[in-house]
Image: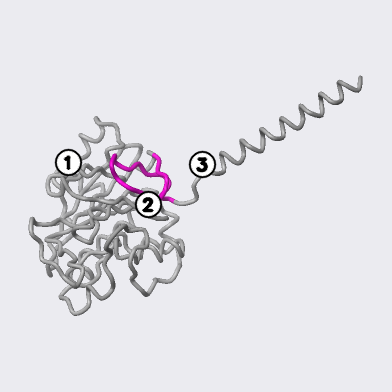
Amino acid sequence: MAKNDNSFLFVLIIIVVFLAGAYFLLNKNDSGDGKGDRAEVPAGSSTTSQLTPEMLEIPVLKADRPEQVIAHYAYTVSYNPDWCVPNWVAYELTREETRGNVPRAIHFEPDPDVKGVCPTYRDYSRSDYTRGHMAPAGDMKWDTTAMRESFYLSNVCPQDENLNDGDWKELEEMARVWAGRFGSVYIVCGPIMSGNPETIGRNHVAVPDAFFKVLLCQLNGNWQAIGFVFENKPGHKKLIKYGRTVDEVEQLTGIDFFPALDDEIENVIEAKADFSVWNL
């Protein structure tokens, strides 16, 4: 081979290596390592990480209400700076995640990604309400970061203690059973507010009138959805008594749930709640 041919080949190899390295770096920067990288944020929302459409649980807030959408490692929260509580909290819970053994965190703390006022631990002190998780610590035992971030106060609402330790907790435990049975469940939960809610603490944290939770799963290739509504007061009933269609919960909350689904599927599954699917 001639000398000029060798020089050309050497330059060509250098160019190929350079292009391959550039391609690798670009793709590495585009990939995410947290569950929060899989969500789509409604237009006009702010977020702390890049989100993609595969996150079926991400709803759309239809009501005229302020929100800051923050994607944490294991859940996404729509934080309402006027209420100092979430509009909604959404996440996927898988069968594998229900088998974690990370110890429960101890300390609640302000969410460092909230822009503006975030509640503090003291806002709940000496009130008549407990710090009620939306995405519960029991669903976050699969990872230390997920556990720690579940104790951010953007994921918390003032909740009646009897409800928090009773029927609300029972539904949280059932969600883990369903995740084990179906392989995964998509969950959205949050508060239901009146026009002029009671507030607690120096930061005027709004007290919900009630709470909602909607769940989506796939059984034998078919999508199934169900909703629940709990008044923020003591009492005990069977879970089926709290059951609602997703359409009913949408009417109460001003939130469009599971909009990533095909409209024909969404319209059908949100109009009915088949309690037998959920063993209620």
Q: Nearer the viewer, mark 1 or mark 3?
A: 3
Mark pair 2, 3: CA separation: 16 Å
Relative depth, front residue between 59 and 96: 59
- The boundaries of the magenta stretch are 35-52
Where is the N terminus found, in terms of image quarters?
A: top right
Q: Residues within 10 Å of mark 1 (few under 14, many from 20)?
A: some
Q: Is residue 142 above or below residue 54?
A: below
- Give the residue number, with chain letter if any, for mark 1: 272
Q: Helix or strand or loop: what does disc 1 sit on? A: loop
- Expressed as whole percent of the image width and height from the top left, the position of residue 114 reads 32, 58
| Residue 71: assigned label | 2
The scheme the figure's colours follow is one colour
Q: Could you tell which of marks 2 and 3 lies nearer the N-terminus?
A: 3
Q: Is residue 128 above or below residue 185?
A: below
For the image shown, how many numbered marks are present on the structure?
Answer: 3
Q: Could you tell which of marks 1 and 3 lies nearer the N-terminus?
A: 3
Q: Residues within 10 Å of mark 2 (few under 14, many from 20)?
A: many
Farthest right residue in view = 2
- Expressed as whole percent of the image width and height from the top left, the position of residue 26 reads 57, 39
- Magenta segment: does it hold 266? no
Relative depth, front residue between 2 and 232: 2
Residue type (three-letter) at the residue carrying disc 1 = Lys
- Give the residue number, with chain letter if any, for mark 3: 30
Q: Going 16% across and 42% down the picture, which residue do you hit?
A: 247
- Magenta segment: does it hold 49? yes
- Can I make out residue 1 in this image? no
Q: Main secondary structure of the magenta part?
A: loop
- Can I make out residue 233 in this image? yes
Task: Verify CB contact (< 8 Å) between mark 1 and mark 3.
Answer: no
Q: Could you tell which of marks 2 and 1 lies nearer the N-terminus?
A: 2
Q: Going 19% across and 72% down the picture, which residue do you hit?
A: 202
Mark pair 2, 1: CA separation: 30 Å
